[in-house]
Amino acid sequence: MKITITPARRLAGEIRVPGDKSISHRSIMLGSIARGDTYITHFLMSDDCLSTILAFKQMGVPIEITGPETVTVKGQGLRGLKAPNATIDAGNSGTTARLLAGLLSGQSFSSTITGDESLRRRPMDRVIIPLRKMGADISGVQDRYLPLSIKGGTLKGIQYHMPVASAQVKSCLILATLYADSPSRIYEPTSSRNHTELMLQAFGGRLDINGNEITAYPADQLYGQQVHVPGDISSAAFFITAGLLVPNSTIILKGVGLNPTRTGILEVYKEMGGSIAIENVSTSGGEKMGDIIVNTSHLKGTVIGGQLIPRLIDEIPVIALAATQAEGTTTIKDAQELKVKESDRIATVVDILSRLGASIEATDDGMVIHGPTPLKGNAVDSFGDHRLAMMAAIAGLIARGETTISGWECVNISFPGFYDMLKKLQN
Ligand SMILES: O=C(O)C1=C[C@@H](OP(=O)(O)O)[C@@H](O)[C@H](O)C1
Ligand SMILES: C=C(OP(=O)(O)O)C(=O)O
């Protein structure tokens, strides 16, 4: 499916972006292995999260979608999952595949996880290697790719220094350790999103956290909870950027997740001169949230790297777009992980933005962008990557002429309703 975006004169209004994808996945997973019911509100009803729901339904968990954003999970207890009736299909979702690999390694049955063409190209050795150290019987294609075959069994805790800062690997090991006979100690090179840690503690699990050192413990039982999912800052990122770039704009984003492990984009935009204010801050289940108010701003270039990268990894495509409109040079470095996302996001971001007239070069670990450069509309492809499709749509708002994006349907992976929300702000 193709869409065409034309320039916007201004954007104004109040929006509520859909629920956080990372937190939505985790609410289904922990809800399924808890005792008692879990009631989830503002759940993200997107393709990725539906892959997680389907996987747990296949393992005998009654999960009821009770409204457009509400889900009830009838928890089966820590040892209550049943052998899946078929191969589990994680679809496009890295989070589903990697977190499930940990959870399934500790079960008393065998299972297989596969995924779509994009996910079958993404590295799974990052979970295979530490899970094997825990005693898991797990194998993948070339020891690296999906499908993964897992013979569940007894696990032991490990000490593990993660080679990359990845919340998916960390969460995989935390979930596996719930079923182990001893604790695991996990060291992260830099902090990544901590939603698993916060939610597991809310469900009655034990963790000791000391900076980047996490001790995860086996569990006897977890207990179902009410989970309110904050708005996804990774989805908000597109509208925050649009508000900064489109002339005469003011956008209010209500109830966005502000967990400090996710707010790198706000720090970067403020540093670049962006007018961004936060109001009405609250906390639920350990997760901070609040309203974000953004106004059109004159941006200047910056350097983005180091410990910031995991705190804004999924926002880099749209930050790169903002950098094309900033005065001076923006350098994004230490972001090699972009190469193993839904697409090679260094190559694909450079491809799309170059086609639109940006001055941007790929580097080994990121990109260098010179601005400001006026963009001009063109035909671009999403590469089947939801974050790129939405980045291109925001670019279309400030590009001269028409921007046509093919492969638009992938937006449903994380943000169904994106297009309607964009239209609403233009009225
Ligand atoms: O744990 C999660 O929910 C996620 C972690 C990140 O991936 P990595 O763990 O591979 O960095 C992120 O890019 C992904 O969109 C969601
Ligand atoms: C990388 C992403 O997700 P996942 O790893 O779950 O596929 C993303 O949503 O940008």
Image (cartoon, rainbow, N blue to C red):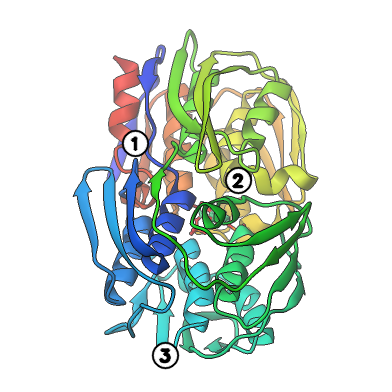
Q: Which of marks 1 and 2 is in front?
A: 1
Q: Which amino acid does label 3 sit on?
A: Ser
Residue 251 percent coordinates (x, y): 45, 17
Above or below, comparing residue 350 to residue 72 in the picture = above
Mark 3, other Cα within 10 Å: few <14 / some 14–19 / many ≥20: some
Residue 107 percent coordinates (x, y): 46, 84
Q: Which amino acid does label 2 sit on?
A: Val
Quadrant assignment, res 20: top left
In three-dimensional space, the C-alpha distance between marks 1 and 2, rounded to whole angstroms, equals 23 Å
Q: Mark 2 points at which residue?
A: 350
* Residue in the picture at 29% in, 67% down: 54
Q: Nearer the viewer, mark 3 or mark 1?
A: 3
* Residue in the picture at 58% in, 53% down: 345
Q: Name the residue under label 1.
A: 418
Q: Nearer the viewer, residue 385 or 274?
A: 274
Question: Which of marks 1 and 3 precedes in the sequence?
Answer: 3
Q: Name the residue under label 3.
A: 110
